[in-house]
Amino acid sequence: MPEHLTVGSLIGLPMGTTPAGRAGSPTPVLVAGGHAGADAAAHAAEAGAEEEEIEGPNWTIAGGEVGHGGQSAWRGDGVEALTFNNPFGQVMERVWFDGKVVYAVDLGKVILDASKVKVAQEYQPVYAAELGTDGRAVRPPEMVPGQLNIYDTVPGMDRYSPIWQFNYVIVPRAYEANTLRSEADCLASGYPILRSQDFEN
């Protein structure tokens, strides 16, 4: 039977095969920091365990090699400490969450009934927005240049959903971009908020 690729064989190898030189036990290597002797053996055993693990929590992958966690969620400046090589060239954006910057993948607009689907809230400070009788924006809102959108939740929170309902926060012309950086900021601002029927995945 001819070899064929599957969804799981993203590196161009048929499922169940390994790249050349990777068959059998992994070869122990000297790791950064100069581990030697028993220490090197322990690190080699750990690497071997990772090599044998078929699936598991808290994986990180760099150059096809599996590691485990160890990365801080946030940098010191409040930006998400994300490492992602975006292999499929997806559109990404920076978004505020609770005063910190996180990264999101934009998968486009969706039409749904929010009474039947769990949704999260996304706030968009804008100069102007108009909703039709269906609750959707009549035209694209007038954006505040440089302003990031604002999420109410992130993955791992009970209220989180990958479907976002847009709330247009109507700010004055004198508003300085990115003054609002959290849901709490928006709700406490006193600015009008239009909860729309515009949704995005």
Image (tube, rainbow, N blue to C red):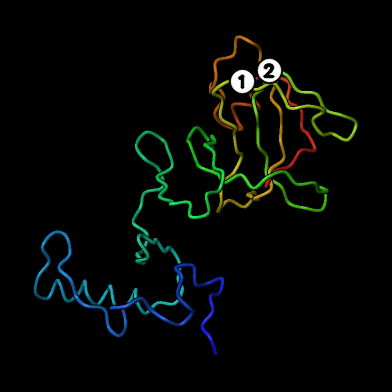
Q: Is residue 126 left or right of residue 52?
A: right
Q: Is residue 54 left or right of residue 109?
A: left
Of the residues under marks 1 and 2, which one precedes in the sequence? 2
For this orientation, the residue located farthest to the bottom is 1
Task: Give the crowd class for mark 2: few <14, some 14-19, many >=20 residues within 10 Å.
Answer: some
The N terminus, quarter of image: bottom right
Q: Position of residue 7 (x, y in %)?
A: 56, 71
Residue carrying label 2: 127
Q: Nearer the viewer, residue 7 or 52?
A: 7
What amino acid type is highlighted by mark number 2? Answer: Tyr
In the displayed structure, 170 sits above or below 109; it is above
In the displayed structure, 15 sits above or below 131; it is below
Task: Give the crowd class for mark 1: few <14, some 14-19, many >=20 residues within 10 Å.
Answer: many
What amino acid type is highlighted by mark number 1? Answer: Val
Q: Which of the 4 quarters of the picture holds residue 143?
A: top right
For this orientation, the residue located farthest to the front is 2
Residue carrying label 1: 144
Q: Do the numbered discs 1 and 2 sit on residues whose CB atoms are within 8 Å?
A: yes
For this orientation, the residue located farthest to the top is 174
Residue plotted at (36% across, 40% down): 75
Q: Which of the 4 quarters of the picture holds residue 191?
A: top right
Residue plotted at (69% across, 48% down): 163
Q: Which of the 4 quarters of the picture holds residue 97?
A: top right
In the displayed structure, 200 sits above or below 31; it is above
Q: Position of residue 10 (x, y in %)?
A: 49, 67
Q: Position of residue 162 (x, y in %)?
A: 64, 50
